[in-house]
Amino acid sequence: MEELQATHRKEQRDLQARITQKKKSATKKTRKGINDECDALERQLKEKQERELAELAGELPTDGTSNGVVEDEPEEKDVSSFPDHPNNIQKPLESLSISSSTPSGRSEKPRKPNRQKARLARRAAEQEASAAQAAEEAANLPDLREQERVAMLKELQMRGLSEREIRADGHCLYSAVADQLTGLGVALEPSVAPAPAPNGVEESRDKLPGYTRVRMVASEFISEHPDDFVPFLEEPLSEYVHKIRDTAEWGGQLELLALARAYEVRINILQGDGRVVSVGPGESAGDDRDIWLAYYRHRFGLGEHYNSLGKGQ
């Protein structure tokens, strides 16, 4: 019995060390699960030790025999006072309770709160709350892309226009203008002789993509009329012209004005709210020199976008 109890005490100390280590590594999210696991380990060890003590007590002789030899019947004694009696086994077991002692036998000092972990936990909670609030606000925002699409379809139906999709890249304005000019029967090369290429060798422009030729016309017109455009620029004219001609820089109001004047057409830009902005050379362009573009702010992922519009299609 003494050997078994010594074994039980060692098992209790080992388990206490395991539980202490588990609780040290617990986080705010895992603390409840670890506490439940520790309670289960204590319960299992207690049941195991109770079973072993009971089995040891049950092996004691109860018929007065030992090694097959019948001995004189001893006088009756109160066996309830024996240390091995089941009623007395629970007492030493209860004295080994894990929660009542520490492995060193000394009372465990209260730990100081970890301020860094507390700050991190508060910060994580604040971030989760902010993310949840942002998601809720985003869910309540209007779908601007869908609203713009529906409004544009309504305007197209009212005006008898059809839409031709232009690839959503930095060339969309020039591609849409090239598509409109081709449909109108206007040559992509204006009557004015084009300026020489930067490398000094004139390129065969008819083999270039339509948007490239339109870009060249816009850059050349702005270069030839600097007084009309320089006051609106925030960079040197040469750099601005280079972006138009040789990069995929998006086009805007100045490029539309340059193209309208270079090709002598009126460019009508239909927007989703029903407004039409017209850019043209003035009275010199008649109704037969009108081209139509659709302008979007929200529908396409890259931002502002132009599509080509046609009548009766």
Image (cartoon, helix red, strand yellow):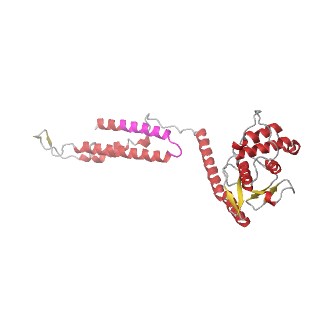
Query: The C terminus lies in which quarter of the figure?
Result: bottom right
**Can the viewer see residue 252 in this picture?**
yes
Q: Quadrant of residue 57?
A: top left
In magenta, the rendered stretch is 10-30
The question of residue 59 being in magenta is answered with no
Q: Quadrant of residue 7?
A: top left
Query: The N terminus lies in which quarter of the figure?
Result: top left
Q: Residue at x 42, y 46 (%)?
A: 39
Camera-side residue: 112 or 213?
213
Seen as rendered, the residue at the extreme left is 69
Image: 18 above or below 310:
above
x and y percentages locating residue 169 in the rendered image: 68, 47
Seen as rendered, the residue at the extreme bottom is 158
Q: Is residue 54 left or right of residue 158?
A: left
x and y percentages locating residue 111 in the rendered image: 54, 38
The question of residue 17 being in magenta is answered with yes
Q: Is residue 215 left or right of residue 45?
A: right
x and y percentages locating residue 49 in the rendered image: 32, 43
**Can the viewer see residue 141 in this picture?**
no
Camera-side residue: 286 or 68?
286
Camera-side residue: 147 or 186?
186
Q: Residue at x 79, y 40 (%)?
A: 241
Image: 13 above or below 169:
above
Q: Residue at x 70, y 65 (%)?
A: 157
Q: How many marks?
A: 0
Magenta segment, prevailing SS (helix, strand or loop): helix
x and y percentages locating residue 75 in the rendered image: 17, 45
Camera-side residue: 273 or 97?
273
